Image (cartoon, grey):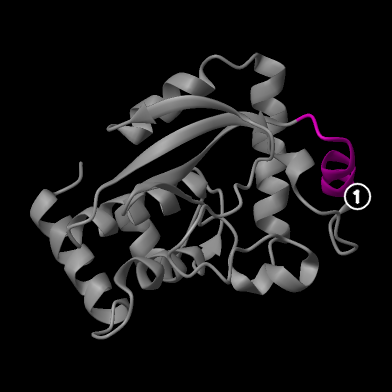
């Protein structure tokens, strides 16, 4: 169970380390979270993302939302349903099974990103891919400067709403998948995490 006071101190410490005085706070926080290593290991808790320096899309975006709120911003997590594999580039160093899925698609998932109230309109912030993946063809959103939407890691998905309890909502959405979809998704994410360049 998450201890709110301990987590609040973790957020304070993270902001102290990454949100330097004189910098644009939202882009600074966004890029600090985005550049954490992507890893889908089943632990989506934001405090674990801080401690390990890695996280899945859910863990990273839950942390991003909480950091932005902690800094006085308005932010929520939104879910989108789509094919996670088909939205990635094929990379020569991927194992054959992973490469086949990325080439053909077929991995149903519920991806999430943060919606930040950025001035006159809401802005979509996807912090899934770190800079180290840019040379491999991933859309890492490295140039985001605080204006306009970032590119979402699932292309052409269907928005499935927002949730305050992100982990509960994610579990409920995953519960709508078939047994085969669940098996394929878990296998795909395991292969992706094991392959992911550090």
- Viewer-proximal residue, 196 or 21? 21
Does 181 sit above or below residue 114?
A: above
Q: Residue at x 64, y 24 (%)?
A: 182
Q: In which quarter of the image is the N terminus?
A: top left
Which residue is situated farthest in the left direction here? 5
Local packing at callout 1 (Cα closer than 10 Å; few below 14, some 14-19, many 20+) is few
Magenta part mainly helix, strand or loop?
Answer: helix
Residue 44 locus on image (x, y percent): 41, 45
Residue 105 locus on image (x, y percent): 82, 35
Residue 74 locus on image (x, y percent): 25, 48
Q: Quadrant of the C terminus?
A: bottom right
Does 21 sit above or below residue 101?
A: below
Residue bounds of the magenta highlight? 96-106
The answer to if 71 sits in the magenta stretch is no
Residue 77 locus on image (x, y percent): 38, 40
Residue 136 figure quarter: bottom right
Residue 43 seen from this side = no
* Residue 96 appears left or right of 154: right
Which residue is situated farthest in the front direction here? 120
* Residue 21 appears left or right of 79: left
Element type at mark 1: helix
Residue 41 seen from this side = yes
* Residue 61 appears left or right of 89: left
* Residue 194 appears left or right of 52: right
Give the residue number, with chain letter if any, for mark 1. Answer: 96
- Viewer-proximal residue, 73 or 79? 73
Q: Residue at x 86, y 54 (%)?
A: 90
């Amino acid at each position: 169970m998450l201890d709110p006071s301990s987590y609040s101190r973790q957020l304070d410490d993270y902001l102290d380390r990454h949100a330097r005085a004189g910098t644009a706070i939202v882009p600074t926080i966004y890029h600090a979270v985005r550049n954490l290593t992507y890893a889908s290991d089943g632990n989506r808790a934001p405090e674990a993302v801080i401690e390990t320096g890695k996280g899945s899309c859910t863990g990273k975006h839950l942390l991003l939302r909480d950091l932005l709120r902690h800094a006085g911003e308005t932010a929520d997590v939104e879910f989108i349903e789509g094919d996670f594999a088909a939205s990635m580039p094929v990379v020569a160093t991927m194992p054959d099974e992973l490469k086949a899925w990325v080439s053909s698609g077929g991995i149903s998932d519920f991806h999430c990103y943060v919606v930040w109230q950025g001035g006159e309109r809401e802005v979509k912030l996807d912090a899934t891919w770190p800079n180290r993946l840019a040379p491999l063809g991933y859309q890492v959103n490295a140039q985001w400067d605080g204006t306009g939407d970032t590119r979402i890691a699932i292309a052409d998905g269907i928005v499935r709403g927002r949730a305050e309890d992100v982990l509960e909502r994610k579990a409920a959405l995953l519960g709508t998948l078939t047994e085969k979809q669940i098996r394929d998704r878990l296998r795909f994410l395991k292969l992706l995490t094991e392959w992911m360049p550090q």
